[in-house]
Image (spheres, rainbow, N blue to C red):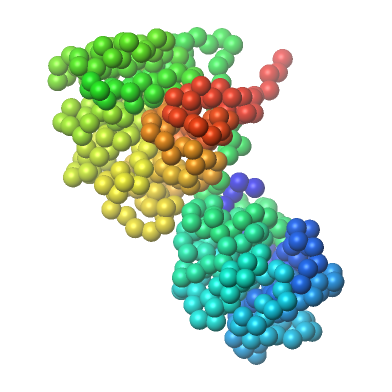
Amino acid sequence: MTTLLSVAEMYAADRAAMATGVSGSALMEAAGKGGAEEMLQRFGARPVAVLCGPGNNGGDGFVIARHLRAAGAPVRLALLGDKARLTGDAAAMAARWRGKAWPMSPAVLDQAALVVDAIFGAGLARDVDGAAREVLAAAAARGLPSVAVDVPSGVHGDSGEIRGYALPAAMTVTFFRRKPGHLLLPGRQFCGEVRVVDIGIPAAVLAAIGPQTRENMPASWAARFPWPRVDGHKYSRGHAVVASGPRGKSGAARLAARAALRAGAGLVTVLAPASAMAENAAQLTAVMLAEIRGADGFAAAIADRRRNAILIGPGNGVTAATRRHVLAALKTRRACVLDADALTVFARAPKTLFKAVRGPCLMTPHEGEFGRLFDVAGGKLERARAAARASGAVVLLKGPDTVIAAPDGRAAINTNAPPTLATAGAGDVLAGIALGLLAQGMGPFDAGCAAAWLHGAAANHFGPGLIAEDLCETLPSALADLPRPKVTG
C-alpha cells in the first residue's frame, strides 16, 4: 500500500476496473458504504451533516448519508447546486437518498456533531469559494470534527496545494490507494488520519497504469540494502571521501563522515585544506584524514579508484575551489553526493553542472539551494521530478515532506521526519548516510530513499532535545528496525 496514485492515475484505475465488468455505480456504492463504516468505527452514530458537491465526490456523500442513517445516525444532507443537474452515477445515488437535500448553508450544521466533507474531490481545478467555503468555515468556527471523502475539499490530490480554503479533517477516507496530496505539505496537515477503503478495484490494474510514486518505506528498497556479508571486509564495503571546509567550517564534513561510517562504509577519509588539518585531526578517530595540497590536490586524492564515493559541499564555501572539486569528482564517474555549497556554487551556471553529471549522482538541496539551481514551477513532487530530468541526477529535495526523484520519473515521498530535525548539521548527516550507502554499492535513488528514512527514524529514536551529533549515535537503532535478509542453508 505504499503506491501513490495521481488524480489522473486514479481515474485510469476506475476505468480499468470498469473494463473488467465492475460498474461505476458499484464502485461508488462500495466507496460510500466503506467510508460510512470507517466513520462509524471512529465516531459512532452521532448526528452528522453530510456536505455533497455536484460531482462524483458528492455521489459518494449521498451513499455515505444513506448508510449512516441506516446505522441510526441522525443525518442532514446539503447539496451544492441543483439535484436535477446531477449526472451519471452521482445522479443515481442521489435518487436513492430518501431524505431532504438542504441548500448549502451554515444552517445544515445546526445540531450536527460531525461533518462529512464530500463537496470537492482531489482534482479540483479552482479555488473553494462561495457557499462551499462559507459552510466549511462555519464548521471550523464551531469546532466540529470533519471526515473528508477522498481529500478535504480544496486540497489538490497531486500537489497537496490548498485551493482557496480547506477544512482540516480529523479523518480522511480515500479509495484503493492514497494520493501524493495526502503526504505532501500543506495538504498532509489537513487530512488527519487517512484510511484507505477497498472498493473492489483489482490490484492487477496497477501493472497497466505503471505508477511511479510511492511513500518512502523500507519495503521499497530493503531488499537492496547493503548488509555486511559474512565473507566481507572493510575494503569490500567501500571507501567514502568527504571534502572538508576551511578552518572554522570543517564540522559539517566531520558530521557527514561519521554518518557515512555509521551507515556501513568500510573506510571514510576526510580530505581537508591545510588550514583545517589541525581541527579535524583533533576530533577524528576511526575516520581518516588527508591534506589537499595545491589546486589539483583534490583531483589527485580521488584518483585512487578504491575511493568509490565522494561527498562535496557541507561547509566547503561558495568558492572556485569547491567548483573545481565538484567537476573533478563528477569527471571520475564514480558515485557522488552534492550538497549545500557544491550546488550553490553553480547558481549562475547550472547547465555546466548538469552537463558534467555522467555517473551516479545524488543532489540533496533544501528549498533555498534548489531555487538557486533549478528554474521550475509547480508542486514539490513536480518540481523535484523536473529537476531530476534536467540535471540527470537523483534529486532529494529536503523538508518535512522530503521528495526523492530520479531522472526516469520514479519518485518517493518521505514522511517520517520529526520537527526536531530542524537543527544545524542535520542535513550534513543525511548527506553522509547517503554517501555511506553509495560507497557500499547502493544506487543513488535507493540510497537517497534509504538515507531519508533512516535519518527520520534515527531522530524519532532519540526524541526531544536532538542535535545533529545525536543522529550518528542513534543510527544503529534505526538500522535495527530494518528487515534483515533471511539466512538460508
Image location (x, y in percent) of residue 431: 40, 31
Q: Nearer the viewer, residue 433 or 228?
A: 433
For the residue pair 112 and 18, the one nearer the viewer reads as 112
Q: Where is residue 55 drawn, in percent x and y?
A: 60, 77
The answer to which image quadrant residue 307 occupies is: top left
Q: Is residue 63 visible?
A: no
Residue at 77% in and 84% down:
99
Instruction: Provide residue 144's location: percent of width, then percent of height.
Output: 65, 67
Image point (67%, 77%), residue name: 109
Q: Nearer the viewer, residue 133 or 110?
A: 110
Picture coordinates of residue 13, whole percent (x, y) = 62, 61
Residue 312: image quadrant is top left
Q: Which residue occupies 76% across, 61% down?
A: 43
Q: Is residue 48 left or right of residue 138?
A: right
For residue 430, above or below residue 243: below
**Residue found at x 36% / y 13%:** 283
Find residue 138 and report its image quarter: bottom right
